[in-house]
Image: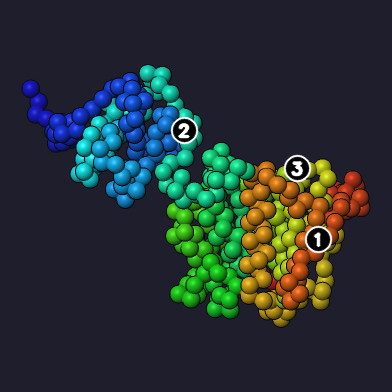
């Protein structure tokens, strides 16, 4: 007879110390008050989990279980994919002092094969705790939070507007954020570009922002594209996203964004700042009544009419206000909640502390979306400035 391998001996020792139950027995114990814990990773649970199970990855078990279930006498059932990780999880729970712990034999694969109840796409314990206040909102709830987790947002510019927008979108649980910016952090950026830090001066803005966002919410996937937006790459950078945020304050980039977002059918959340004033709107080609960016600015302004930001200056907190409004509009669009700023231009005067709303209708003569508009592809032009 061949000798047992080290792995087989290890599993045999675990099974000797951890009692196992069949999935049907686990379901019966759950009905009697036992807590079923799905210890698989977040991505594994996204496709489904046993109905009523608490999602808590094995790596977080020791850190979170005592807060989630302080009663050491409550029966606990650990379940994984096939029944191995759950043995380790059950052993950990025993070490933590839980008196009645079982591992579910065969894991989730056997649970499904036996036709036991499954919940699709439920939130795990980390998400339930992290987004607890947001989940209380009837406009969001678990379904809305899961929707945000599946969303993909492209953000052009990791600067003054992009910083607050990215921070709050990551905090809200947007599943995938693509940062597009080829610039590097400068000390003069820091008074308004709050996603960066003194120690990162000289670093690519996309990488600096990624570090901050990952520290804030490690659940969010951050894709960095250290590229300058151009006619040759604009569609490839934006394709596959749900919403595009204009955080560039660059007329050349805006005209490219306007054309590409319209071509791809993506809503564009526009924001701009200068000195003590800012403005925001939403251009959504999915809505027949929505104007486009060129209804507001039909032609690229002359350089004299668009002074460089370093010349005109900007109040440091102003991009924060406008960027937060952009993040708010983005979340509303993703959830289809409330009334977006489609057909409305919201202007803000920081010196007077006053908001003003202007009706923005579709221009029948618009070179971008009018009946006579003809798409001639994309063209590169000289930019003005970046926030």
Number of labels in the image equals 3
Q: Above or below — where is 338 with respect to 279?
A: above
Looking at the image, the residue that sits furthest to the bottom is: 311
Kindly report the distance in space between the C-alpha atoms of the residues bearing marks 2 and 1: 44 Å
Relative side of 65 to 98, left or right: right
Q: Mark 2 points at which residue?
A: 47
Q: Name the image quarter holding residue 178.
A: bottom right
Q: Which of marks 2 and 1 is in front?
A: 1
Label 3 vs 1, first from the N-terminus: 3
Residue shown at 46% from the left, 62% from the top: 211
- Looking at the image, do the residues carrying marks 3 and 2 touch, with CB atoms under 8 Å apart? no
| Of 24 and 234, the residue lying toward us | 24
Position of residue 272 relative to residue 20, above or below, is below
**Residue at (64% x, 63% y) in the render:** 323
Residue 113 in percent (x, y) is at: 38, 20
Reading the image, the residue beneath label 3 is 286
Q: What x and y, as percent, mark residue 383?
A: 72, 68
Q: How crowded is mark 2: few (under 14 residues within 10 Å), some or many (20 or more)?
A: few
**Above or below, comparing residue 280 to residue 55 in the picture:** below
Residues at marks 3 and 1, CA–CA distance in whole angstroms: 22 Å
Which quadrant of the view contains residue 159? bottom right
Q: Name the residue under label 1.
A: 357
| Figure check: 112 above or below 6 | above
Could you say whether the residue bearing mark 3 is in a helix, strand or loop?
A: loop
Is the residue marked by circle 1 packed among few (<14), some (14-19), or many (20+) residues within 10 Å? some
Q: Residue visible at 76% across and 65% down?
A: 355
The x, y position of residue 242, in whole percent, is 64, 45
Give the left or right position of residue 363, taking residue 198 as reference: right
Nearer to us in this view, 185 or 354: 354
**Could one spot residue 383 in this view of the protein?**
no
């Amino acid at each position: 007879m061949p000798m047992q391998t080290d792995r087989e001996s290890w599993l045999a020792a675990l099974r000797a110390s951890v009692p196992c139950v069949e999935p049907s027995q686990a379901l019966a114990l759950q009905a009697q008050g036992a807590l079923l814990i799905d210890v698989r990773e977040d991505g594994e649970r996204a496709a489904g989990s046993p109905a009523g199970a608490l999602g808590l990855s094995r790596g977080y078990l020791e850190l979170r279980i005592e807060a989630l279930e302080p009663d050491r006498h409550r029966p606990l059932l650990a379940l994984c994919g096939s029944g191995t990780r759950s043995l380790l999880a059950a052993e950990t729970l025993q070490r933590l002092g839980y008196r009645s712990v079982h591992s579910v034999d065969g894991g989730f694969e056997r649970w499904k094969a036996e036709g036991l109840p499954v919940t699709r796409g439920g939130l795990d314990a980390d998400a339930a705790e992290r987004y607890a206040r947001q989940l209380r909102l009837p406009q969001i709830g678990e379904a809305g939070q899961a929707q945000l987790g599946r969303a993909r947002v492209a953000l052009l510019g990791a600067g003054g507007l992009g910083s607050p927008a990215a921070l709050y979108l990551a905090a809200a649980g947007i599943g995938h954020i693509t940062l597009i910016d080829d610039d590097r952090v400068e000390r003069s950026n820091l008074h308004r570009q709050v996603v960066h830090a003194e120690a990162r001066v000289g670093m690519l803005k996309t990488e600096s922002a990624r570090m901050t966002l990952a520290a804030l919410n490690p659940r969010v996937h951050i894709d960095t594209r250290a590229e300058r937006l151009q006619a040759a790459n604009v569609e490839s950078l934006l394709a596959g996203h749900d919403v595009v945020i204009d955080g560039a304050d660059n007329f050349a980039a805006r005209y490219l964004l306007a054309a590409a977002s319209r071509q791809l059918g993506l809503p564009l959340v526009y924001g701009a700042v200068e000195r003590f004033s800012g403005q925001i709107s939403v251009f959504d080609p999915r809505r027949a009544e929505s104007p486009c960016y060129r209804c507001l600015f039909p032609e690229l302004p002359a350089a004299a009419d668009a002074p460089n930001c370093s010349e005109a200056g900007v109040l440091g907190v102003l991009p924060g206000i406008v960027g937060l409004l952009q993040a708010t509009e983005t979340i509303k669009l993703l959830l289809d909640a409330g009334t977006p700023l489609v057909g409305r231009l919201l202007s803000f005067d920081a010196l007077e502390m006053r908001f003003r709303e202007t009706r923005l209708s579709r221009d029948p003569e618009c070179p971008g979306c009018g009946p006579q508009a003809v798409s001639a592809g994309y063209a590169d032009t000289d930019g003005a400035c970046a926030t």
